[in-house]
Image (cartoon, grey):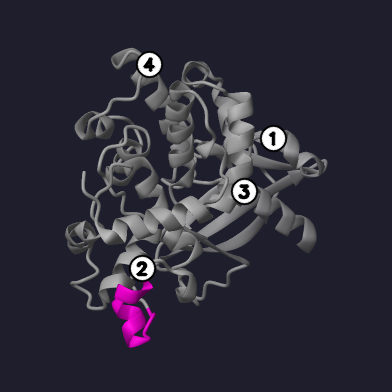
Amino acid sequence: MKEQLVTKKILNWYDLNKRSLPWRKNVSIQKRHYYTLVSEFMLQQTQVATVIPYFNRFIKSIPSLEILAKVNNKKLIKLWEGLGYYSRARNLKKTAQTVIKNFDGKLPNNFEELLSLPGIGNYTASAILAIVFNKPYIPLDGNIERVLKRYLYLKKVKEIEKDNLIRKKSIFGVSSRSNDYAQALMELGALICKPINPLCNECPIVKKCKSYQKKDFDLTKKNKKNKDKYFILKVYKKNQRYLLVKNTKFNFLKNLTIFPMEELFEPKNFSENLNFKMSNMNMNIKIQYLKNSGKFLSPHWIDEKKLDNYILPSFTKKIVRYLEGNL
């Protein structure tokens, strides 16, 4: 496979500058498949620096696909606690079960079958095909998108649409080292072509970069509007314990333990105590202190002094800490 000059330059840079990451260790093929699967699930919407300690803990506790398929859900969520987007953990376990049941315990090596697995979309399927199976796929994550936009000076709204970026990424060519090349492009975006103050003097493809030629590195952002939502959060406390419930009501933090909450639609004169950004939602929360908690069928009472003993999303822990600091 003849490689383009741009491909060679990026790979040469990567060979000299790549980070030592735990999922890049030189391990058996079976482990590499498993490490890639776990890391790619964790890296969905989460930065590398945040993922590293979680990945190490996870692999130490659940060292194989077979153990993951049978792991206790409480243990799984506890290991994931703090990473957020808990559906990723549940889908990761379901994927392990499906791979064992339908694919003889081995990750499928084609796009359609990978897409059939829970929690795997176009990006993750492309990443697995490139990193695990050395197939000529370039997974279009935020880092690679940024390199592409600057390299080709894509500024107009139509130019930065996903479909156009997918077409334009062919400018990067292909490599016989597809597994390294996919990671090299991600690494280039993460370490050099940063969102702010890119390190152009260290970039291997700077000479052909149109943004560098124009000295204009600003990125056109898509207008993503966070939806304003309003909630009453109900606090019941007795004997230094807070009442929590299993969330079967809201799409966020599904099936996890939260404070009882009620959504308000178009409230007037809403005075919030707390504000959270969650996915594409701007959560405005007003706290209501109540006494009678008899209506909850299976409440969870937690001791505010022993938060780490419980499997709780960060959202709930932050609420408890706020309450303790403002009582």
Q: Is residue 88 above or below residue 171?
A: above
Tag 3 and tag 1, C-beta contact below 8 Å: no
Which numbered tag is attached to residue 314? Answer: 3
| Mark 4 crowd level (few <14, some 14–19, many ≥20, 10 Å Cα) | some
| Mark 3 crowd level (few <14, some 14–19, many ≥20, 10 Å Cα) | some
Q: What's the magenta region?
A: 206-218
How far apart are labels 2 and 3 at the CA level? 41 Å
Which numbered tag is attached to residue 205? Answer: 2
| Mark 1 crowd level (few <14, some 14–19, many ≥20, 10 Å Cα) | some
Marks 4 and 1: which is nearer the front?
4
- Write the residue at 40% across / 68% down: 266
Quadrant showing the N terminus: top left
Secondary element under disc 4, as helix, strand or loop, is: loop
N-terminal of the two: label 2 or label 4?
Answer: 4
Side of 35 where 143 appears, left or right: left
Amino acid of disc 3: Ser
- Write the residue at 35% across / 48% down: 182
Tag 4 and tag 1, C-beta contact below 8 Å: no
Examine the image and state in which quarter residue 133 appears. top left
* Residue wearing tag 1: 310
Marks 4 and 3: which is nearer the front?
4
* Residue wearing tag 4: 105
How far apart are labels 2 and 4 at the CA level? 40 Å
Q: Picture coordinates of residue 126 (x, y %)?
A: 29, 42
Amino acid of disc 4: Gly
Q: Main secondary structure of the magenta part?
A: helix
